[in-house]
Amino acid sequence: MVELVSAPFSGGVRSIGTVTAEPAADTTELYDPGPVEAKWQRRWRDEGTYDVDNDDPRPPFYVLSMYPYPSGRAHMGHVRNYTFGDLITRHRTMQGHAVLSPMGFDSFGLPAENAAIKTGLHPRPFTDARIDELKSSIERIGAVYDWRREIRSHDPEYIRWNQVIFQRFLAAGLAYRRNAPVNWCPGCQTVLANEQVLADGTCERSGDPVSKRDLEQWFFAITNYAEELLDELDGLEWPERVKTMQRNWIGRSEGAEFDLVVADHPDKLAIRIYTTRPDTSFGMTYAVLAPEHPLVAELTSDEQRAAVEDFVARVATKSEIERLASEDHSAAGAAAASDRGVFTGSYVLNPFNGRPVPVYLADYVLMGYGTGAIMAVPAEDQRDWDFAKAHRLPVVRTVQPPEGWQGEAYTGDGPKINSEWLDGITDVATAKAKAIEWLEEQGLGQRKVNYRLRDWLVSRQRYWGCPIPVVYCPTDGIVAVPEDQLPVLAPDEVEFRPSGESPLKAHAGFRHTTCPTCGGPAERETDTMDTFVDSSWYFLRFCDPWSKERPFDPGAAERWMPVDQYIGGIEHAILHLLYARFYTKALADLGMAPASVREPFRRLFTQGMVRLGGTRMSKSKGNLVAPEDMVAAYGADALRLAHLFAGPPADDVDWETVGIEGTSRFLKRVWRLALGEAAPPASPDAAPQVDRAAHRLVARVTDEFERWSYNTAVAALMEFANLLQREGTTDFAVDTLLLLLAPMAPHISAELWERRHGAGTHVHAQRWPVADPALARADRVTMVVQVNGKVKDRIEVDPEIDEAGAEAVALASPSVREALDDAHPKRVIARPPRLVNLVM
RNA sequence: GCCGACGUAGCCCAACGGCAGAGGCACGACGUUUAGGUCGUCGUCAGUGAGAGUUCGAAUCUCUCCGUCGGCACCA
């Protein structure tokens, strides 16, 4: 690096630069990002440039990048994420906002605990060291935050408020404990939320196959908010695909519930079923219960008992994976399909026509959805069709399939048939409505909306997380630890063993306690909370991280919330973003957050992933490109610009195709231009054109910032620098370039601004420039003249030219006249001043 | 299987119904340079995945197909 600085600057270039207006320093200084970046990072930190108080009079703007899990030094994904956030922070500040831009660390979680199991080092020092590393590498790329507001999930203060919120949820019935079949990951040695199990039945984190276990667990009643979580998606400025993913996940379906009375049963026993197709009820040819359904024993006849018990036992031992593996509609054939169910020996009556149909058990009916029982209509449901074929059950079509229908079950629209009083209706929707109306009139059932979303299982059998603050007392049952005794903190001196149970369970001193209510001996809950709990409200705590009385002051939250721009990875499209929405609504309803804030993130941007050679960059693949190497070689500004320039922010980028050389060269050129080294001042003739181009640049870049089109904004700045190189500079043009560059490449912009305007001046304290449309207008523009859509001529015209004038100019063109061959155009489309099209 | 995005020079990408090229990488020539690098100037390369339609005009809108990626998928 020293060699670079002292290298003699080319004499030839110097001679071009002798006419510069800048005082010609005799030692021409090459752009060396290292010292410049260190200087400005120190200054921003020491001066608290981006600290913002809650009573700041400027209009508020809250920009937030998802806080990271502290994994040590930053990787390219972090750089990309924080570059976007930092750019917005600086841009909005220049536009006159008080920008809240906080940062913290999602510091609970499995990696630290797994490391503890391996090395014996306690997760806390391990985590703190990782945070220090990550924090310094975030600062090294020039990202600025109000670090006074920093949050760490494992901080006892944060744990306290996490637990207070849990207690309020408990008191409000939003947190509850129940026995349930839950997802168990053998790799992570803990239960998982549904959201953490991938579609193939494996754990999203470890990749191990997840099995089912019956356990007493804590849940949050997120399903209470299913409808609102679905409805309010519409008003959010989020990527459509994220909204679609959430809609799919919530999975609303509309249908009806009604009873099927058991035939020949003395107590008029009935099975309640849920269906989305009540219009097909006349086609019911059997009914199905989930194997875990409570009425299974009651409905099993003596002859069938052995077969049923055998079937139920077999299903119970099947893992999720095996149940999915049997989903082989095509190849497996009747043998496999018939294995998926068994006859109970009982019959129920179809209330629509009074006919008895047999009752089966089948593994494709799930206890956890609807009522755990269905009416089966093979003609209009493929699963029922497959099952019916395997068990030789009849099929009755109630919707007329279209002409030439070759398929099996027909689920499309069509006229009703075989359905008594529904016959003659020509569409499914009307028939559905009529069937529901009939059920309600007869008092047999009613309209019913169901959701796929399940309550959020928050218990984790792990150590490195927020303890669930309850005590189990033999006399008082579940007792919440009183708020004035919070936080409940896990002891440090525990033994980390991969035992499948939290080290807390083996820690007698922690486990055995006294009941806060009766004072008698009691046991603590030894499970901790899902770490997604921590990230479900951290953005609220950022508004008021100093509060000692409550998680945050609702007034402070009201000032900043909702987050104006949230930035993160698409991988959180369902989990984190759904939980955070739930928390925001629940806290508002409990009066802990402002009632007016029902959604946490007004605008969401999901950035693309950084790949290398087509695959995901990851430590396990060993294909990481270390950002610090890039910073050392090219500087943080060049790295930031490379990320911004790499392509549309929402798209994945392949680092192999990212040319950091290009952005590095561009910055060197800016450096020389701003110091008067690269080009002379523009001539009096050229200067007004240059300034006009600067105005156009302002308009363009400002617009592109609004649209997140940073790749083209960088291109525009490059284009402009090339223009200055060619045409010469003006002070206005160079200053404009630096102002527009300031959010993207903050160090070099700040340095050059200070050099041009004097010590104590700061480019980031300047107002974002506003283009003057009058000055931005070019004085001549090129008008294209087409004949039948083919370009025949290009003519320089006044930008104010009107339609008639444009037409006249077009017709006067010799090459156009030749193309017209003296004929009159049939039609003239004039779009002054850009284009005239003459149609023959 | 269903839903959704995306297919443009050798590569990454622009073009918000109006000249297919803004920018960068790579490559080449020339200049600067003792040389390499840096720097500067200039240049090479596609007709937009395929087909049809709408339009005065389509990369852009519509439809079908192909390919890539993502989400959902026993949810009754």
Image: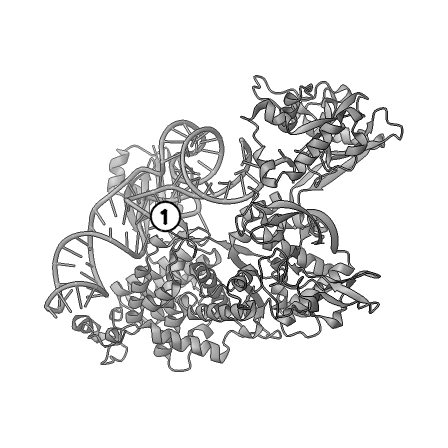
Query: Quadrant where the N terminus of chain A lies?
Result: bottom left
Residue A768 visible in the picture: no
Q: Secondary structure at mark 1?
A: loop
- State left or right for residue A283 relative to residue A711: right
A836 vs B70, nearest the viewer: B70
Label 1 neighbour load within 10 Å: few <14, some 14-19, many 20+: some
Q: Position of residue A753 (x, y in %)?
A: 37, 75
Quick check: A372 above or below A746?
Answer: above
Q: Chain of mark 1?
A: A
The residue shown at (80%, 20%) is A355
Query: Quadrant where the C terminus of chain A lies?
Result: top left
Label 1 sits on residue:
A834
- State left or right for residue A554 relative to residue A4: right
The residue shown at (70%, 53%) is A219
Residue A698 visible in the picture: yes
Query: Residue reaching furthest right?
Result: A266
Quarter of the view holding residue A382: top right
Quick check: A470 above or below A675?
Answer: above
Q: Position of residue A372 (x, y in %)?
A: 73, 37
The kind of residue on which mark 1 rests is: Arg
Q: Position of residue A117 (x, y in %)?
A: 54, 62
The residue shown at (83%, 61%) is A476
Q: Position of residue A775 (x, y in %)?
A: 39, 63
Quick check: A500 above or below A330?
Answer: below
Quarter of the view holding residue A745: bottom left
Quick check: B48 above or below A136?
Answer: above
A264 vs A637, nearest the viewer: A264
